[in-house]
Image: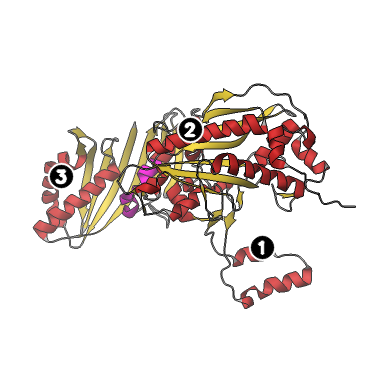
Amino acid sequence: MIYFDLRASFIFTKEISDLYSVFDNFFNNNTDKILSKNDEVGSTIEDFNINDNKLTIHLKSNQIVRANEALIRLKKELSNFIGFKFKIGIREVLINFFIIKIEADNGVDIETLPYVKNIDYENDRYIKIVFDTETEQKLTFSEIEKRIPDRIITLIKNKLEDYGGKNEHWELLWESEDKKFESNEDPTELMLNEGWIKRGYNRGQWIYGPEATYLFRTFEKIVLKELLEPLKYTEMIFPKLVSWDVWMKSGHAQGVYPEIYYVCPPKTRDPKYWEDVKNIYNITKEVPVDLIKEKIDVPIGGMCYAQCPSFWGFLQGETLASDQLPLKVYDHSGTSHRYESGGIHGIERVDEFHRLELVWVGTKEDTLEQAENLKKKYNHIFEDILEIKWRTAWVTPWFMAQEGKHGLSDMKDAGTVDYEALTPYNNKWIEIQNLSINANKYTKGFNVKSQDNKLLWSGCSGVGLERWAAAFISQHGLNSEKWPKKFKEYFKNMPKGIKTL
């Protein structure tokens, strides 16, 4: 259960001291309409008082009609009644105090929330939320109207579900037969020792030499010839700097913050504004990053975290012609960036990575059919061309996981299949790509419609080139003579590497 305790003041445009009996009759005769739902009482008026032009009212409620909802209803009905009968308006509504108690078996680990003064776990029974009604960050009636308290309750409930062990879902779907491995060594160390790759200057970044780059391009060629061309996908270029507006519509704004690389523009391009920075560098030969921090503006967004959200700006607010469906596109135009949690490792877990991203849009039937077509193509590639040990698993949907959510989708047939490969040197499985049915999440979020007004769904699938390389080399090694025959038909001749002394 959830309990609400709210005191608020209505400030009228004229004095109302002589209208006590009018308000008393109003409350007595209108409580069913204002404070009840489906004949169940949700809120009660504990007391009220009048002082000059101010009416202060004390509300308590359960969750049938929450006190904050009752306050909105009261303002509307009072405005109509007092305005019509006495030509008096409501100038503003002040929140004096507001407390919410949520029954829970445990507390939640939250240090700060907007508009909240403090959160306590009271008597081993309630999470007590006390709203700020005094400082500049106080809860106002405007926030009440925007349903801020309700969103805070939803956030607390989600935290409680996470605390209670509603973990990320993982369910094995299929696993390939055992393979004979040609290697039992760390693929990153193998490539480092042979000069195929070198560490970049930034965290989780690699510089790929001719050999590794050609391997990546071979993977792309295989995907193009075996999957994209037969299934008639068209290439596009998706933006790699993603705005907040995109992440708000895609849902990422709910939880992406610890993992993105932020982009901040300069406050101005005026050379004089930057003169001190240039002077300091020229004298000290050190970049004054603290000074630069003062001269850059607020983040406008971040580097591409997942490729497909920025695609949807192309379709936002549009109506797709029926003969365009299913729409099938892909992008492999640049890097993605993610501040990885749990530490980086080799080329498998990096902050800068390379992917092919496939997106398709159509009816529900189109979307599910396309997913099955892709699964067959991936099976062919992994089994007959790459010849790796791999498996698939039904996991927490991609669109939920990247919003910080767990479990499975409530939408039937929507969800994510992870593709994993074994790395023999440590006997672990790594995710090498995924395939997701996103239902109408993105078509609804970006307001995309069809000509015949049919409900549109979408799907996406990301192929991780670093992960493919890690899996392939981990199982097959660097000796191309021992690589699978059909793969070598695509790879052909090893390029000449860069030799250093």
Look at the magenta stretch and give its main secondary structure.
helix
498 lies left or right of 467:
right
The residue identified by callout 2 is: 372
Q: Answer with left or right where residue 213 lies relative to residue 18.
A: right
Q: Nearer the viewer, residue 101 or 150?
A: 150
Q: CA distance from mark 3 to mark 1?
A: 60 Å
Q: Find out whether the residues at labels 3 and 1 contact each other: C-beta distance under 8 Å.
A: no
Label 1, secondary structure: give it: helix
Q: In this rendering, would 24 be left or right of 369?
A: left
Inspect the image, locate mark 1, and give the three-letter code of the amino acid beneath it.
Asp
Checking the image for residue 27, the label placed there is: 3
Q: Residue at x 62, y 75 (%)?
A: 273
Count every numbered label the image shows and give the total.
Answer: 3
Looking at the image, tell me whether mark 1 or mark 2 is earlier in sequence order.
Answer: 1
Q: Nearer the viewer, residue 19 or 170?
A: 170
Question: Does the residue at mark 1 contact the one at mark 2 (Cβ under 8 Å)?
Answer: no
Label 3 and label 2: CA atoms lie apart by 61 Å
Q: Position of residue 91 (x, y in %)?
A: 24, 61
Tell me if residue 349 can be seen. Answer: no
**Mark positioned earlier in the residue sequence (3 or 1):** 3
Identify the disc placed on residue 43.
none
The CA distance from mark 1 to mark 2 is: 52 Å
The location of residue 113, given as percent across then percent down, is 46, 46
Residue range corresponding to the magenta coloring: 141-153
Q: Position of residue 306 (x, y in %)?
A: 54, 46
Q: Is residue 387 left or right of residue 108?
A: right
Amino acid tagged 3: Phe
Give the residue number, with chain letter if any, for mark 1. 290
> Amino acid under label 2?
Glu
The residue positioned 72% from the left and 37% from the top of the image is 488
